[in-house]
Amino acid sequence: MKSVERPPILFLNIGWMINYDGPNVNDPTRGNFGWLQGHPHGHECYNFSNQNGFCYGSHPSSFNTDITRLGAMKAAMSIGGVLVVWFSRDPRTNKAVIVGWYEDAVVYRTFQARQGGPTLYDYPIDYKVSTSHKNCKLLVPSQRWFVVPNRSETPGGYGQNPNWYGLGDSYLNKVWHYIQTRGAIHGQRKPRLRTGAPRSNDHEKLRRVEDTAIRIASAYYRSEAGGSREVKSVELQNKGWDIEAKGPIDTLLVEVKGLSGKSLVAELTPNEYTKMQKHESLWVLFVVTDCLSEAPQSYEFRFMHDANRWESASGGVLSIVTKTAAVVSLV
């Protein structure tokens, strides 16, 4: 940061994306904004795209921004030195969270036209905010945990207007601290070691696959990409998930499936499937394929409330086929 003092802060509500680097069929803009009901992408899809060393930010709807609340004079059309915080409703948890920010940004009272800029569906993309690309920080989805309250939850929270100015000094200071620390919350913990007697070849192969999957999943959630979470193994407790990944506001219940082949086909036990349905906002399916190779592949599936289905971060949709079983005996 350029200064230890808290700058003026503007919050802008936008649709949910992974990269915000232009329209991508695997990264649609998700949300309840009117424009998105008929288009797969909103103008905010370019918000973190590097455009000749700059980022130009847009938000849904045509609301003006009251820049006087950020310190501008009444007649001014723009103000610089603003911290712009972008937030969106996470389709996995149905909570609005901070997805990224612009430091030292220029904020305009009205949308600005840009000559030679990108277009979307033949419409030019006007912008409300601009800054140097080096001042932009986009969080990966696992790091998006700082909740932004709406007015139905908290008096003074954000409403229909995409522009929001915070909840006063206490809340703004928390946001400022979060951004200064880049959301760093946890140190690393040593991985759990397994002990036990030698096993048969088939059992040993199965255990190697399971161990590899657990190790990869645990390392992912401990990493920055996975949210720098505290990981605890609960494999032997028959909870319906294998590890618990504790973050600052929630604990993910992660069922880990290891596969020796490349095909992503796995079975859930009745208990696991029940917990998957019961805890859909927190339960996660983490699948590792090709576990015995030098390059295993991992996939994380989360429930997306807006689409009512399980998806991976890359847009893959989980197909679920339920089965019934029977117990037979001699009478």
Image: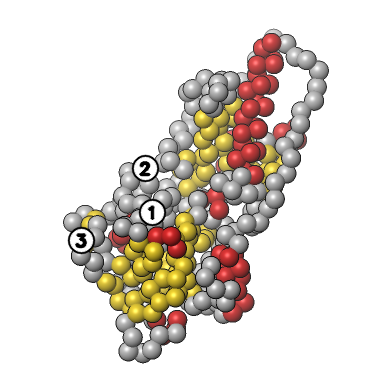
Pointer 2: what residue?
26
Please name the residue shown 36% across and 42% down the image: 26
Q: Earlier in the sequence, mark 1 or mark 2?
A: 1
**Figure check: 136 above or below 170:** above
Q: Residue 77 location in percent, x, y?
A: 32, 82
**Figure check: 160 above or below 211:** below
Q: Cβ–Cβ below 8 Å for labels 3 and 1? A: no
Please name the residue shown 61% across and 68% down the image: 177
Q: Is residue 161 visible?
A: no
Q: Residue 292 location in percent, x, y?
A: 58, 20
Pointer 3: what residue?
116
* Left/right of residue 204 with respect to residue 53 in the rendered view: right
Could you say which quadrant of the image residue 48 lies in?
bottom left
State how the image is colored. secondary structure
* Left/right of residue 74 with respect to residue 71 in the rendered view: left
Q: Amino acid at mark 2?
A: Asn
- Across the whole image, how many numbered discs are drawn on residues? 3
Q: Earlier in the sequence, mark 3 or mark 1?
A: 1
Please name the residue shown 68% across and 39% down the image: 243
